Image (cartoon, helix red, strand yellow):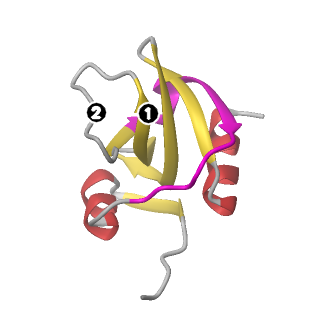
Amino acid sequence: MTVHEVLRLAITFKRCVRIRTAGFSRDICPHALGFKDGSPRVLVLQYDGASVSGLAGGGQWRAFFVHDIAEATIIDGVWRSGPNLVAKTEACLDRVEYQTRISAA
C-alpha cells in the first residue's frame, strides 16, 4: 500500500498513523489530503513523536508533502482533532481531494 493509500484509509476510518519523515517518527491523525502548489499534501494533527520545533501538549497541526513521507503505517490509538480544522485546511491546501467528515455540533 502506498503512503497516499494509507493516509486516505486512515482519514476514512479515523485511524492513527505512524509516519517517518525527515528522519523523525511521528504519530498523527490525518484529516485532509489535497494539493499545495500542485504537489500532494496532507494536513494532520501530530500528537506524539519527534519534531525539530517541539510539540504542544495536546498535539499540533502539521502539513507534510506526501512525497516527503518515507513510511506510513496505521496504528492503534485514540483519534484526535483540534481547533480551527476548516481554517487550517484552507491555509494548508489549495485544493482538497479528501477529508475527514466534520461532525455537526
Quadrant hosting residue 98: bottom right
Marks 2 and 1 sit apart, C-alpha to C-alpha, by: 8 Å
Residue 89 position (above or below residue 48): below
From the viewer's side, name the closer residue of 79 and 7.
Answer: 79
Q: State the residue at coordinates (30%, 51%).
A: 92
Residue 56 position (above or below residue 49): below
On whether residue 20 falls in the magenta region, the answer is: no
Sooner in the amino-acid sequence: mark 2 or mark 1:
1
Q: State the residue at coordinates (34%, 65%).
A: 85
Residue 103 screen position, x and y as percent: 50, 81
Q: Residue furthest right?
A: 1
In the drawing, what numbered circle is on residue 55?
2
Range covered by the magenta-colored residues: 64-81
Contact, CB < 8 Å: mark 2 with mark 1? yes
In the drawing, what numbered circle is on residue 1?
none
Circle 2 crowding by C-alpha within 10 Å: few under 14, some 14–19, many from 20: some
From the viewer's side, name the closer residue of 102 and 97.
Answer: 102
Residue 46 screen position, x and y as percent: 41, 40
* Badge 2 amino acid: Leu
Q: Quadrant of the N terminus?
A: top right
* Badge 1 amino acid: Asp
Residue 58 screen position, x and y as percent: 33, 48
Query: Residue at label 1?
Result: 48
Looking at the rendered structure, the secondary structure element under dot 1 is strand
Looking at the rendered structure, the secondary structure element under dot 2 is loop
Circle 1 crowding by C-alpha within 10 Å: few under 14, some 14–19, many from 20: some
Residue 94 screen position, x and y as percent: 33, 57
Numbered label tally: 2
Q: Quadrant of the C terminus?
A: bottom left
Q: Which residue lies furthest to the bottom in this view?
A: 105
Q: Which residue lies furthest to the front in this view?
A: 57
Quadrant hosting residue 22: top left
